Amino acid sequence: MANRLPTPLFNTLEHLPEQSALGDIAFTKDFIQANAFLLSYHGSEATFNAYRREVERLLQWAWLIAKKID
């Protein structure tokens, strides 16, 4: 099996509310909760970017490495 690089899950702060990638994601519950968390930081782009990076890492690790499913 070839190694597959993870792709970004969340858009930029400007475009996050209109993101419609849910149909492509098998782990919808995790994604919706993470998306809601990120949306709560709409007042600070720097904080949003830092949290987005960490949420991405956590979800990618949980889904791809640890094989955790909601």
Image (spheres, rainbow, N blue to C red):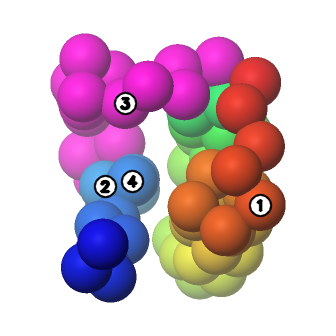
Report how far apart the C-alphas of labels 3 and 1 lie in the structure: 17 Å
**C-alpha distance separating marks 2 and 3:** 14 Å
* Numbered label attached to residue 66: 1
**Counting other residues with Cα less than 10 Å from the Cα at mark 1, is it few (<14), some (14-19), or many (20 or more)?**
few
Tag shown at residue 25 = 3
Label 2 or label 3, whichever comes before in sequence order: 2
Q: Quadrant of the N terminus?
A: bottom left
| Residue 36 appears in the rendering | no
Q: CA distance from mark 3 to mark 4?
A: 9 Å
Q: Disc 2 or 1, which lies upstream in sequence?
A: 2
- Residue 51's image quarter? bottom right
Q: Are marks 3 and 4 in contact (CB under 8 Å)?
A: yes
- Label 4 or label 2, whichever lies nearer to me, is 4
* Relative image position of residue 28 (x, y in whole percent): 52, 20
Residue 26, given in percent of the width and then of the height, sits at 44, 25
Residue holding disc 4: 9
In-image side of 18 versus 32 (left or right): left
Mark 3 crowd level (few <14, some 14–19, many ≥20, 10 Å Cα): few
Q: Is residue 68 magenta?
A: no
Q: Which residues are magenta?
A: 14-29
In this image, 57 relative to 25: left or right?
right
- Kindly identify the residue that appears in the image at 39 percent across and 53 percent down: 10
